[in-house]
Amino acid sequence: MESAREDEPAGKTTWANLGKALGPGILVACAAVGGSHLVWSTRAGAEFGWSLVGLVLLANLFKFPFFLYGQRYTAATGESLLTGYYRHGVVFVWIFLLFNILTGTINVAGVAMLSAALFAGYGFTALPVAQITVLLVIFCALVLLGGQYRFLDGFAKVTIAVLGLSTLLAVAFAFFNYTAPPPDFRAPSPWTLASFAFLIGLLGWMPAPVDLSAWSSLWMFSRQKQTGHFATPRETAVDFYLGYVSAVFLAVVFLALGALVMHGTGVSFAASGIAFSAQLVQLYTETIGDWSRLLILSAAFVTMFSTTMTCIDGYPRALAACCSLIGRCDVERFAALQRFWVVAVAGSACLVVLFFVQNLVQLLTFAAVASFLTSPVLAYINYKVMNGANVPRHHRPGRLLKLLSWSGLVFFGLMTAGYLYVLLFYGG
């Protein structure tokens, strides 16, 4: 399994080294923007207005420590977060492995299908969305099988910047051109049993599933191979905060776009892939102008395509790391396992899209709910690992971070129990 050399010096934090360290945290932000923000934040604003801003911020706050631990643990110990799992018992690695086999397949299928629906917006309607999805997944898998982490890293940084600027521009136009809903409009309440499944879906991908914390840990070693520099804890913190704060800010911005443009109009998002993606693009063009349609469509597609590629890299990388730890494999074997899992995850996602999915929104909801239900377990393991005896004391969580961690664990646990109760006794 990958790890930094134990005798590697920490080095000084210079602008050059900081530039070499930036990447893993931004990749997580890219995955978050494509998955939760473009879909869930926008839908939250469109359906419930500003009612869910507090919940969005709360979800980001409670998940913050568990994402932080992924990169901080690696910077402090020189080993991956999953190696930390192994230190506390191989059962934790097995738990992560089984959870990721489930969530990896459906999450890749969901983001890839939305990418394909956006691609169809260019006029490529000769093939059904499901078949376009398969072609996109195969293309991403082939690029990653070629070992193109450098392409993934650069692509993510550009796409998150383009979509972020586009969304800020759209929100600015929407704010100055805002038309209040008619006087007789009564906004639906999100605090009902009927809306509970939506809230769990929003929480599941806000800002991203907790298992992505292991991805950023593993990406640190790929970034080291690319630049020749292993990030110090201080440099890692800058990378993490830059990515995470950007994700939180954009979550509110996307919610604002949905609230300012769609809320109160009587229009709701469609279930079909092409109609859903067209409505996303229309949100921008209605505020910026029709001239921006191609630009916005391209920004949205490239963002979702980047998210798809990020997921097809992240899940197999984490699954290969788990198998390497369980089987005590060397680095060469890890590379072979990673290629195997790229093919397996891509192939299973294609099967889900071709044979089991008719409704894009339903697939995205199922993927987000499944991600949330695994959150309490994975968050607890992250906390346990970060407080391990092998972590230098000054890098372990302080009182405030411990309080926030336990508050998050209680929140995830209560919401999970509430969802299961509603599902069992009220039919979801």
Image (cartoon, rainbow, N blue to C red):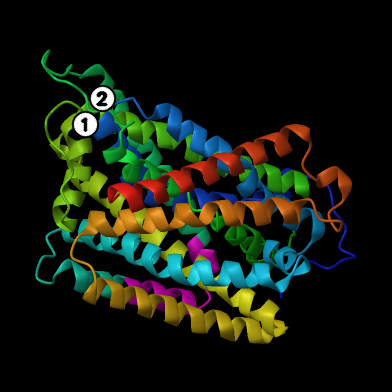
Q: Do we see residue 293 in this rendering?
A: yes
Residue 329 rendering spot, x and y as whole percentages: 70, 85
Q: Is residue 383 above or below residue 117?
A: above
Percent of width and height locating residue 293:
18, 43
Which residue position holds label 1? 288
Q: Is residue 207 visible?
A: no
Horizontal and vertical percent for residue 333? 65, 87
Which residue is drawn at the image coordinates 15% and 19% (left, top)? 181
**Residue 231, image x and y in percent?**
74, 54
Helix, strand or loop at label 1? It is: helix
Q: Nearer the viewer, residue 88 or 212?
A: 88
Three-letter amino acid code at disc 2?
Phe
Which quadrant of the figure has residue 301? bottom left
Q: Is residue 177 left or right of residue 232?
A: left
Q: Are marks 1 and 2 in contact (CB under 8 Å)?
A: yes
At x 83% / y 54%, what residue is drawn?
Answer: 391
Q: Nearer the viewer, residue 309 or 11?
A: 309
Magenta span dominant secondary structure: helix
Q: Is residue 168 left or right of residue 267?
A: right
Separation (CA) of disc 1 from disc 2: 6 Å
